[in-house]
Image (cartoon, helix red, strand yellow):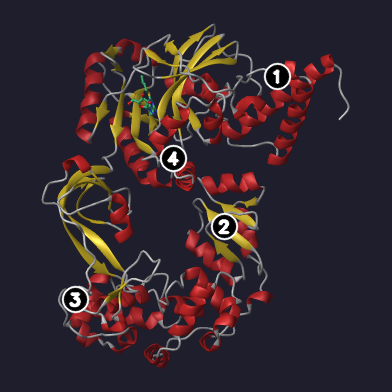
Amino acid sequence: MSKLDKKKAQAKIKQLREAIEFHNYRYYVLDDPEVPDAEYDRLMRELQALEAQYPELVTPDSPTQRVGGEPLEGFEEVQHLVPMLSLENAFDEAEVQAFDKRIHDRLKMDGDIEYVAEPKLDGLAISLLYEAGKLVRAATRGDGRVGENVTQNARTIRSIPLHLQGKDFPQRLEVRGEVYLPKAGFIKLNQAQEKKGEKLFANPRNAAAGSLRQLDPKITATRPLEMYCYSLGLAEGAALPDTHFKILQKLKQWGLRVSPEIKSVNGVAGCLEYFAMMENKREQLPYEIDGVVFKVNQIALQEKLGFVSRAPRWAIAHKFPAEEAVTKLLAVDFQVGRTGALTPVARLEPVFVGGATVSNATLHNMDEIKRKDIQIGDTVIIRRAGDVIPEVVSAIPSKRPKNAQQIKLPGRCPVCNSEVVQLEGEAIARCSGGLYCPAQRKEAIKHFASRKAMDIEGLGDKLVDQLVEIGLIEHVDDLYKLNVKQLAELERMGEKSAENLIAALEKSKQTTLAKFIYALGIREVGEATAEALAMHFHSLENIMQANEEALIEVPDVGPIVAGHIYSFFRQPHNLEVIKSLQQAGIHWDESEKPAGDLPLAGNTYVLTGTLESMSRDQAKEKLQKLGAKVTGSVSSKTTAVIAGEKAGSKLTKAEKLGVTVLDETALMRLLKQ
Ligand code: IVH
C-alpha cells in the first residue's frame, strides 16, 4: 500500500474506526450484522496497516487495541460515583408475593405494579464510564463503594463499545451490567487449561472473574468474555425516559448490549410466569443464569421506594434452586449397563438440590474416583443441573472421617457373578457375562425399544425389568412372541395397556435399515454410524458380510468400531436373534435409493435452535432421507447450518467460519427436493 500523507491517514483511520465500531454494534448489540465477517476483517486489516505506518496515531481506544496492552503491577482502586448496590433474594413464590405486597403497602397503591423482568446473569458486575461518548473507565464492583480499575481488560471485550453510537447520549454516562463467560467459552477454556496442565475453573462465573481480574490484559483478550447492561449509575447532560424499560432501550440505541430476554410484565403474576418460563429456558441459553430479577418499572416509583441498607426496595432477585449441595457418601454400588460397563453409583444421605431430593448420583468410573480422591464416608458436593443425571463433583478433604473407606472395583459382576475385566488403557471396567448377564440383557432390550431405535411405545424401563425378571422374555426377539393374555396378567397392567403394547410392537415392525442396525446395540454404533452403514451398504446382508476392510470405508468408522461390527455379526447368538426378528415380520424398504443418487448426497448440515414446523429430530430424519449427513458440530466442512429460533453458539460459530446459514423457510425449500 502506498503511504498516505499524515492528514489523510488520520481521516481514514477515524473513518475506519467508526465503521468497525458500527459493525461491532450491529453484531453484538443488535445481533444483526450488516456485512460478512470477511468485510469486517478487511476493515480491521486496513486500519492495522495504517496504524503500523503511523504508530503515533494509535490510541488505546482504537479497535485494534482490543488484543490487550502491557501487564499491570496491580489494579488501581476506583471510588464509585454512585455506590453499586446488591439485590435482596427471594427463594420461593411466597417471598416474591411478600416483596410485591411490601411495595403496594409502601406506595399505598392498589392494582398491579408494572415490573421489568430480567435474567440474573451469573458473572460479575462491572461499571462502565463514558465521557463524551468515549469509554474512559471500567471498574469491578468491589465492596460496592470501592472497586478495581479494569479498563484495560474491559477494552478487550468486544461487546463493550469503546465509543457510544449516535449523538444524544449523556455527556457523562455510567452504566452497569454483568460480564460473563458463555457456556461454550467456559468448556473451551477449561479444555485449554487442562492441555496446559493448569488449574481448571470450577464454573463460568469463577472463570469470568478470573479473566476480568487478570493483570495481563493479553490473557483477558484470549477469553471470550461478553457483557450485558442492566442498569444506569449516572447520566449527566441528557434527559432520560421515565421507565426502566425505556432506559434500557436507550442504552441499546447508544450501542450498549442489553439482553433480549428482558421483558416488561404485569403484577406479581407476570413475575412468576416469567420465572417459570426462564426456568424452562435456562438450559438452552448460551450462558448461565442463577435466577431472574424483578424491578419496578416506573422511575418515579423507584425513587419513592428508595433503599434499605445496601439494596433497593424496588428490586428483588428470584433465585433458582441451588444446583450444588453438600451431603454424605454412604456407600457405592456398581450398575451394569448394556455393554457390561460398570458404573459406580453413589448412595447418598438424601439432599435437596436443583429442585429435587437426590439420594443417588453417578461417580462415572474408577479413574474419576481416583482423580477426585473420593472415599466412602466423605462429605461430598453433589451437582444436579436440569435433566442431567446428578453427579458427585468432589469431596471435601478436611471433612474426611478417620474410618473413611476406599472405593473398590468388584472382581465379579454384582448381577451375574461373571468376572469383571478392564482392558489396558480403558477407563471402563466391564462384566464379561455378555448376554448371560440379566442386567446387560435388560439394558439391551431397553435400547432396542427406545424412541430412536424400534420406537416401541409403552415399553418402559420398569416393564422391561419386570418381563426379564419373571422370565417372559430373555432376548429382544422374544418381545414379538408376547401375547395380550400374558401381558394382561402382569402387575400394574390391564387388558387395555396389554392390547396397546401388542399394537405398538406390531407397528414397530415397519422400520428402516438404519434404525434396525442402531437397535441391535452394537458397541459404539450410535445413530449416526448406523445411518452411515445403511447408506453405504444398502442392505443388512451386505453389512453382515462386510469384512473389517470394507467397513472402514464407511465415513466415521475406524478400525475399533469396524472390529466391533465385524465380531457382532460373527456371534452365532446374534445371528439367531436377527433371523428370528426377521421371521417375526420386522422389515424395511431395501429399495431406498443409494445415497449417491439422492439430491442432498455429500452435503453435511447442522441443526440448531427451535424450528416451528417440526422438531429437530424430524428435520434430521427428512434431511437424511434425502441423502444428507446431519452432525452436531459446525466445522469448515459443514455445508450449511440450519438455524431456528434462539439459535446459540453453533450459529455464532457458523458465522465465524463463514459457513452458510439457512432459516426455516430455506429448510422447507431444501426438503421439497
Ligand atoms: S441489578 C440496584 N440486574 O446480581 C440493582 N443485577 O445479587 C443492582 N446481576 O451485583 C443490580 N443480573 O452482579 C441487576 N439483571 C440484573 C442482574 C444483576 C445479574 C448481579 C449483579 C449484582 C448481583 C446482585
Furthest-top residue in this view = 237
Q: Nearer the viewer, residue 583 or 504?
A: 583
**Structural crowding at the residue carrying mark 3, measured as other residues with C-alpha within 10 Å and reported as few (<14), some (14–19) or many (≥20):** few
Measure the alpha-carbon separation of dots 3 and 4.
44 Å
The residue sitting at 47% across, 59% down in the picture is 615
Q: Quickly name the residue at label 1.
A: 58
The picture places residue 67, in percent across and down from the top left corner, at 61, 29
Quarter holding the N terminus is top right
Q: Quickly name the residue at label 3.
A: 493
In the rendered structure, which disc, 1 or 4, sits on the residue that comes first in sequence?
Answer: 1
Q: Nearer the viewer, mark 1 or mark 3?
A: 1
The picture places residue 483, in percent across and down from the top left corner, at 26, 88
Measure the alpha-carbon separation of dots 2 and 4.
21 Å
Query: What residue type is disc 4 on?
Result: Tyr
Is residue 368 depicted above or below 29 in this figure? below
In the rendered structure, which disc, 3 or 4, sits on the residue that comes first in sequence?
Answer: 4
Q: Nearer the viewer, residue 39 or 492?
A: 39
